Image (cartoon, rainbow, N blue to C red):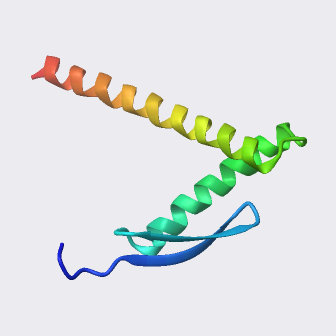
């Protein structure tokens, strides 16, 4: 909307600070950053020799996998709801 201010927040992810600007609340942005941080640490535990760039890509792929699996489940549930009508 016109005139609405964007949220501007600095978050730390895997030891680096990032300034995030968006339409969502600070709490939501912190939640997203925390999720990314958690994923990166999970992957790093099993792959100690990965540099940060590769770790970020593997984390992004894992998050994308989570998203696609959830999206598929939602589609299946929507189809089931349509059948049950």
Identify the residue shown where x is 51% and y is 77%: 9
Above or below for 49 versus 6: above
* Count of number-bearing discs: 0
Asked if residue 18 lies left or right of residue 42, the reply is left
| Quarter-of-image position of residue 80 | top left
Q: Is residue 22 above or below residue 46?
A: below
Q: In the image shown, does 77 or 59 lie closer to the viewer?
A: 59
What x and y, as percent, mark residue 55?
A: 74, 44
Q: Quadrant of residue 23?
A: bottom left
Question: Residue 61 at what x, y percent from top left?
Answer: 60, 35
Depicted 30 relative to depicted 52: above or below: below
Q: Which residue in the rendered view is the most extreme toward the top?
A: 83
Residue occupying image coordinates x 22% and y 21%:
79
Closer to the camera in the image, 30 or 18: 18
Closer to the camera, 27 or 24? Answer: 24
Report the side of 65 relative to 4 (left or right).
right
Q: Quadrant of the C terminus?
A: top left
- Residue 36: % across, % down: 61, 53
Q: Residue at 67% of width from left, 47% of height from top?
A: 39
Q: Residue at x 47, y 72 (%)?
A: 27
**Toward which corner of the image does residue 54 lie, by quadrant?**
top right
Horizontal side of 44 relative to 56 (left or right) equals: right
Q: Quadrant of the N terminus?
A: bottom left
Extreme residue in the right direction: 49
């Amino acid at each position: 909307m016109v005139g609405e201010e964007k949220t501007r927040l600095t978050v730390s992810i895997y030891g680096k600070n990032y300034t995030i600007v968006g339409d969502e609340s600070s709490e939501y942005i912190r939640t997203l950053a925390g999720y990314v941080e958690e994923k990166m640490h999970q992957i790093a535990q099993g792959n100690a020799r990965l540099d940060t760039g590769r770790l970020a890509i593997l984390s992004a792929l894992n998050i994308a996998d989570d998203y696609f699996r959830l999206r598929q489940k939602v589609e299946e549930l929507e189809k089931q709801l349509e059948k049950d009508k």
